[in-house]
Image: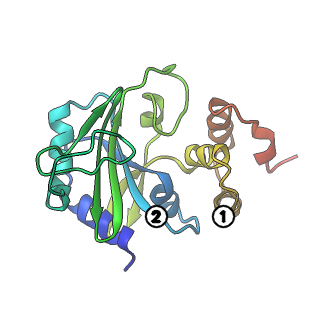
Amino acid sequence: MPNWQRALMLFSDNAPDDVSWMLVGSTATRLHRVCVEPADVDILVHPDTAEEAVHRLVEALSRYAVDGPAVQDLEDFLSTHDQTMLAAGDWLFGRWMVDGCKVEVARIREPVDPLLLLETQGLFVWTLREVVEWRGRFLPVVPLEVQVATIVLRGQTARERSARSAMTERGFNQELLDRAMVARGLYPPRWHTGP
C-alpha cells in the first residue's frame, strides 16, 4: 500500500467527527478517480474552526511529532511534541512525516470575497464539499472542478491531462468549473466540451 494511503487511513480513522475538514490537493484529485500519484496528504480545516478544535483534529497525528525545537518558518516547519501547530499570519498549520509521507493540516482565514470559489480560501467552497467513498470510509473532499482550477493555475500539465480525461469520461459540472477557473483568473472556454 502506498505511503499516502496509509497516512490517510490513519488520519481518517482517528479524526474527531465534530471537526469540519476536507481533503484538497493531489490526494483529493486521486480520490476523484484521476490517475495521479499523491506525494502528500493535504487536509483543510474549516476557517471558523477554533484553535482548540484544530488541535483535537491533529491529535490523530501526534505520535509522528518530532523532537523540538520547532522551526518557525512555514516552509520548513515540522510539528514537534511541544508545538504541533504553527500560527503564521492567517494560517494555522501543522506538518508531519507519516511512514515517509508528508501530511499537512491547515486552517486558512485569509479574507476573500464570500462568493469567490477557491480551493483553500474563503467559505464558499465549503458549501460544495463532496463526500467520496474510499476503502470503506466516506471522506470529505474538495470538488474536482475546483481542484482542476488550481492544477491549471500551477501549470501541472500532466495532472491537467489526467483530470481532463477523467472528467470527460465521467462528466463534470461545467458551471462549477467555469466559476472556479474565473476565480483563479483563468479562461474557462478551453475546458468547454460542447459546441
Question: Circle 2 is placed at which residue position?
Answer: 39
Foreground of the two, 120 or 115 = 120
Q: Which amino acid, by three-letter code, is at mark 2?
A: Ala
Question: Circle 1 is placed at which residue position?
Answer: 162
Residue 68 tag number:
none
> Which of marks 2 and 1 precedes in the sequence?
2
- Judging from the image, the colouring scheme is rainbow
User: For this view, does 175 lie left or right of residue 4?
Assistant: right
Q: Position of residue 15 (x, y in %)?
A: 21, 53
Q: In the rendered image of this protein, does residue 118 appear above or below residue 130?
A: above
Q: Label 2's element?
A: loop
Q: Position of residue 23 (x, y in %)?
A: 40, 51
Q: Is residue 16 visible?
A: no
Q: Position of residue 150 (x, y in %)?
A: 59, 44
User: For this view, does 182 lie left or right of residue 53?
Assistant: right
The local crowd at label 1, few if under 14, some if 14 to 19, many if 20 or more residues have their Cα within 10 Å, is: some
Residue at screen point 65% across, 63% down: 166
- Location of residue 174 (image quadrant): top right
Q: Quadrant of the N terminus?
A: bottom left
